[in-house]
Amino acid sequence: MSEQQYVQLIVTRQDGPDSQPYKEEFKIPYRKNMNVISAMMEIQRNPVNAKGEKVAPVQWESNCLEEVCGACSMVINGKPRQACTALVDRLEQPIRIEPMRTFPVIRDLVVDRSRMFNALKRVKAWIPIDGTHDLGPGPRIAENDRQWRYELSKCMTCGVCLEACPNVNSKSNFVGPFVVGQVQLFNSHPTGAMNKEERLEALLDDGGLQECGNSQNCVQACPKGIPLTTAIAKSNRDATVHMFKKWLSN
């Protein structure tokens, strides 16, 4: 009978929003094709640390388990990513798991991503409709435009781009790359374009496009491969045209 293999994890924990973070080590039985979520579930079933002490189960968030919902974002071996697609066999051990520090920590790996949803409200990331009556068929969209919008629509508000961006920090009010992508998504829709200037004004306000340092970390870190730097470049052009139009109209 072969010797049992184990997976070693070092989890950065925090008992509450105002508590100090600390590290706790766990050693769990290895199974083939494990991901980080299955490792966390093993700790939940048997919350005993590497010292053999019974501890409170580690708190984290997950939902779809197929990289669609964005709930299981955390920092794994120094890289912000989705835990559901982080395969244990491809990770260097010990596996170091931390919460995303861009957001306030609620407990352990659970963070408050309210700033992302507040930013979406700020740029009106929706298409307003007049009532719920039948509006008829939607406007026809060119295939190139449809493909562009589809890529932008993949955003799952996971927060990884904010964690990876050096311009999102305590000294900056930058709303983050994902917001710019969502502005492009809704401004490129024939109906959404009715509020185009309003969204661009929001991006020109404090914490908007001027805070982007073009580090391009976001496009490398995005789990869905969204062309965020292209969206930022397009938004910079749209904002420049918008400002010139305002200046000429005065």
Image (cartoon, rainbow, N blue to C red):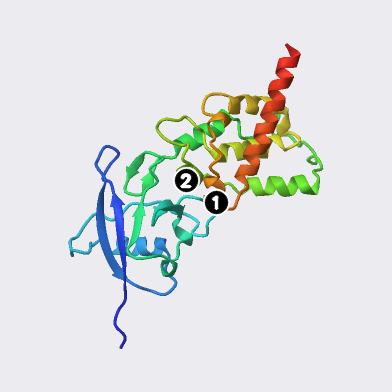
Q: Find residue 36 and name its label.
A: none
Asked whether residue 143 is in view, the answer is yes
- Name which residue lies at 46% across and 60% down: 84
Q: CA distance from mark 1 to mark 2?
A: 9 Å
* Picture coordinates of residue 219, whole percent (x, y): 57, 48
Label 2 near label 1: C-beta < 8 Å? yes
Q: Is residue 156 above or below residue 9?
A: above
Q: Nearer the viewer, residue 232 or 156?
A: 232
* Picture coordinates of residue 229, whole percent (x, y): 61, 43
- Secondary structure of the residue carrying numbered label 1: helix
The quadrant of the rendering that contains the C terminus is top right
The quadrant of the rendering that contains the N terminus is bottom left
Residue occupied by mark 1: 220
Q: Quadrant of residue 231?
A: top right
- Name which residue lies at 29% across and 58% down: 10
Q: Is residue 51 above or below residue 112?
A: below
What crowding class fits label 2: few (fewer than 14 Cα within 10 Å), some (14-19), or many (20 or more)?
A: many
Q: Amino acid at mark 1?
A: Gln
- Name which residue lies at 42% across and 75% down: 32
Q: Amino acid at mark 2?
A: Ala
Earlier along the polypeptide chain: callout 1 or callout 2? Answer: 2
* Picture coordinates of residue 5, whole percent (x, y): 31, 76
Asked whether residue 131 is in view, the answer is no
Residue occupied by mark 2: 164
Q: Is residue 19 above or below residue 35?
A: above
